Amino acid sequence: EPEVTQTPSHQVTQMGQEVILRCVPISNHLYFYWYRQILGQKVEFLVSFYNNEISEKSEIFDDQFSVERPDGSNFTLKIRSTKLEDSAMYFCASSPGTANYGYTFGSGTRLTVV
Amino acid sequence: SQQGEEDPQALSIQEGENATMNCSYKTSINNLQWYRQNSGRGLVHLILIRSNEREKHSGRLRVTLDTSKKSSSLLITASRAADTASYFCASATYGGSQGNLIFGKGTKLSVKP
């Protein structure tokens, strides 16, 4: 069964450093997403991406965040200057369409900012 | 606003029993989805129910949707120890933009052998 692959599974970074989280969505999916889950809290929407541009973003997704699809397969989330409160599990997801499709999530990247 | 609030927050049952989890949401939706998350792992899509559907089945799962009450329930019948996980409902609303799923806080289900 097709999977969404995320790397790395765990990243530790110093406050103020830039991190790039990588995702390979399912190949025939058209819509890509990033979500995050702070330990013990809700899964929160960050951004959705379609046709090589951001289609929607949440209030969390401020100027320190950016997404990119640098080639035909990868989908990345960059955090420019990490803060302690960015520590969370970051999930990438993809779906074939918008309405009435379930999302396929990756296993996540646990980001720890120290 | 808070969408997709589940209750109970935690549920502990014996293997073979049924588990019922409830979810409430606040705004109009296109569909409502349920996901499972094993500890420290990703979210697995379980079932999707459209706003014009009232009930849906998938294996041991039964989902109901009451749009007048803005609520949904997930029933897992004949539970197994392997069903131990957190279960999240997620409301999907599409209007203008590509839309997104809004997750609740989840119900932590523990099934004892």
Image (spheres, helix red, strand yellow):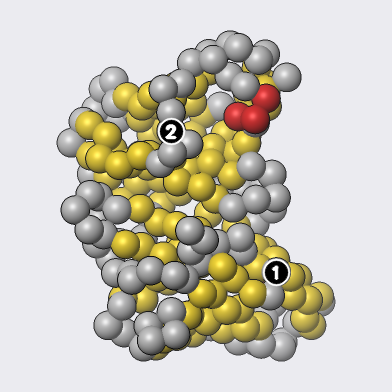
Which residue in the rendered view is the most extreme toward the front? B1
Residue A94 located left or right of residue B94: right
Q: Compute the Cα span from label 2 to label 1.
A: 28 Å
What is the number of callouts on the image? 2
> Dot 2: what SS?
loop
| Three-letter code, disc 2 | Phe
Camera sees residue A34: no
Give coordinates of residue B44: x percent, y percent. Answer: 50, 58
Q: Residues within 10 Å of mark 2 (few under 14, many from 20)?
A: some
**Letter of the chain that mark 1 sits on in the rendering:** B
Q: Quadrant of residue A50?
A: top left
Q: Where A27 falls versus A21 (above or below)?
A: below
Indicate which disc residue A24 carries.
Answer: none
Q: Which residue is mark 2?
A: A61
Give coordinates of residue A45: x percent, y percent. Answer: 45, 46
Q: Where B96 falls versus B7 (above or below)?
A: above
Q: Residue at x 48, y 63 (%)?
A: B3
Same subunit, labels 2 and 1: the answer reads no
Give coordinates of residue A87: x percent, y percent. Answer: 65, 31
Indicate which disc residue B9 carries.
Answer: 1
Q: Residue at x 51, y 74 (%)?
A: B24
